[in-house]
Image: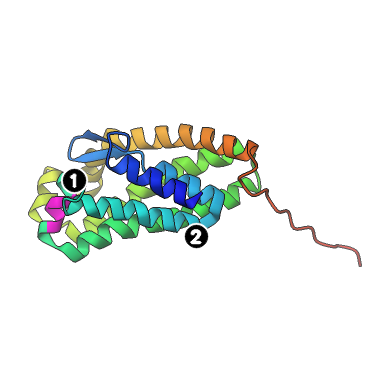
Amino acid sequence: MLGLMAGILFLMAYTPLGYLNIGPLAVTFNVIPVAVCAIVLGPTGGAIAGAVFGLTSFMQAIGIGGVSALGSALFQINPFMTAVQCFGPRILDGICIGFIYRAVHKKANTYVSCAVTGFFSAFLNTLFFMTALIVMFGNTELIRNLMGGHNIIVGCCLMVGVNAISEMVSSTIITAAVGTALSKAHLIPAVQIVKTDTAA
């Protein structure tokens, strides 16, 4: 499953399937394979898939297999921080949604659990990415221009805007559908309910 999702991530990264360019940032659907790995393989699988996602993003920042306008600009400013920007948020996203799925799946059915995981995969990816962007590059002329003179909160909302909403909606719907199919194929681990003995 991990190999399959890694292959899909590379396929999506280097074809129009993975990105829809709107404004300075692209709508990415690569959060969906990360969510699927987190669902099936837990936080570890989510982290590895997130690292693969980060690798494809960094490769595009340095012009391998495609070019990310923002990534390329950040790489010119600071290559090391660009690598952290590409990998860090995606790995952290994969870990967090692995735990989110486990927690939600104990209280809800598979469809709802996968939908919630899909939503948070996109939401946290955007949150972590923008946080890292502001922390590491917020004082650069590039980011100040993208902010358009607004404060950080308003500027971030204007930057991600439609992109973030599109990612969250698509990730929620598709992850729920894929997760349900995988559950019917018995590829998702069943919830383990721990019973405690209350007898004296």
Which residue is rendered at x = 64% and y = 49% of the image? 189
**Which image quadrant is residue 42 in?**
bottom right
Q: Which secondary structure lies at badge 1?
A: loop
Mark 2 surroundings: few (<14), some (14-19) or many (≥20) residues within 10 A: some
Give the mark nearest the N terminus, 1 or 2. Answer: 2
Left or right: residue 199 versus residue 171 is: right
Q: Which secondary structure lies at badge 2?
A: helix
Left or right: residue 99 versus residue 135 is: right
Res. 122 in view: no
Residue 144 rendering spot, x and y as whole percentages: 12, 50
Residue 110 rendering spot, x and y as whole percentages: 61, 39
Taking the view exactly as shown, the residue that stands out farthest to the right is: 200
Residue that numbered label 1 is attached to: 68
Amino acid, disc 1 = Ser
Left or right: residue 61 versus residue 122 is: left
Residue 95 on the magenta span = no
Amino acid, disc 2 = Thr
**Which image quadrant is residue 16 in?**
top left
Query: Observer-nearest residue: 43 or 134?
Result: 43
**Which image quadrant is residue 58 in?**
bottom left
In this rendering, is residue 26 above or below 88? Answer: above
Magenta residue span: 71-75
Residue 54 rendering spot, x and y as whole percentages: 31, 54
The span from disc 1 to disc 2 (Cα, nearest Å) is: 27 Å
Residue that numbered label 2 is attached to: 44
Which residue is rendered at x = 86% and y = 62% of the image? 198
Res. 132 in view: yes
Mark 1 surroundings: few (<14), some (14-19) or many (≥20) residues within 10 A: many
